[in-house]
Image (spheres, rainbow, N blue to C red):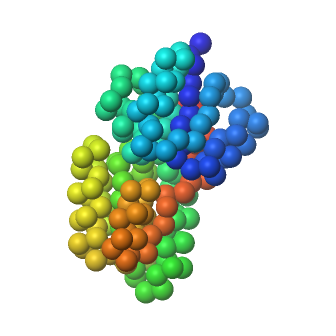
């Protein structure tokens, strides 16, 4: 049997994972909230303890894949989760058709092809394929003068420095549940 470790960037995601494990039978051996700066050392430590698979999201998942050889199951936000974030963004930006930047790694997002017409927004995706390209994607979103940025911690920090409203890519239990069943 494989030993599986779940890494998440925020405490609320840890609580969500705990709720999932209470109600359903998944074989997660360890769950841990980690700082992105500690991702590589945490992954190597888990590997040394016998972990065969790591479940992680976004930047953390990309770092683990880039710097280790351990298999990674990536947490991808569902359409409903992204819909909730778009709805929140529209409440913050009260323009008739706000320009919303979705910034992060392509491995984090569901298909948003029809979101512009469904939610009456202008969604611009700034996706990075690797660690080095994330900063470029964030700076491009800022230079494009979007109304709000939805992204992870790195994007949120850059948005705050640029004076642009932002939302963290928070999830519900759905995306974690899907990753646990993968």
Residue 165 locus on image (x, y percent): 43, 75
Q: Is residue 157 left or right of residue 29?
A: left
The vertical placement of 35 against 149, above or below, is above
Residue 164: quadrant of the picture: bottom left
The vertical placement of 121 against 62, above or below, is below
In front of the other: 77 or 160: 160
- Position of the N terminus, as image quadrant, is top right
Residue 16 locus on image (x, y percent): 66, 46
The vertical placement of 173 against 145, above or below, is above
Q: Is residue 21 left or right of residue 56?
A: right
Residue 136: quadrant of the picture: bottom left
In front of the other: 123 or 126: 126
Instruction: Decide if residue 116 is in sight here.
Output: no
The vertical placement of 150 against 66, above or below, is below
Residue at 24%, 73% in the rendered image: 144
Residue 145 locus on image (x, y percent): 28, 77
Residue at 59%, 37% in the rendered image: 32
Q: Is residue 88 left or right of residue 140?
A: right
Instruction: Decide if residue 38 is in sight here.
Output: yes
Residue 64: quadrant of the picture: top left
Q: Residue furthest top?
A: 1
Residue at 56%, 28% in the rendered image: 5
């Amino acid at each position: 049997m494989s030993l599986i470790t779940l890494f998440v960037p925020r405490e609320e995601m840890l609580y969500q994972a705990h709720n999932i494990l209470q109600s359903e039978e998944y074989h997660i051996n360890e769950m841990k909230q980690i700082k992105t700066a500690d991702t590589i050392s945490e992954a190597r430590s888990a590997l040394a303890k016998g972990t065969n698979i790591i479940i992680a999201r976004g930047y953390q998942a990309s770092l683990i894949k880039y710097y280790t050889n351990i298999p990674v199951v990536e947490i991808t936000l569902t359409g409903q989760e992204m819909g909730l974030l778009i709805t929140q963004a529209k409440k913050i930006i009260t323009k008739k058709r706000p320009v919303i930047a979705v910034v992060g790694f392509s491995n984090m997002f569901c298909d948003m092809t029809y979101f512009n017409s469904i939610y009456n927004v202008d969604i611009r995706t700034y996706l990075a394929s690797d660690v080095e390209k994330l900063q470029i994607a964030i700076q491009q979103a800022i230079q494009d003068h979007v109304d709000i940025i939805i992204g992870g911690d790195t994007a949120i920090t850059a948005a705050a420095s640029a004076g642009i409203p932002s939302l963290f890519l928070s999830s519900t239990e759905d995306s974690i549940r899907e990753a646990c069943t993968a």
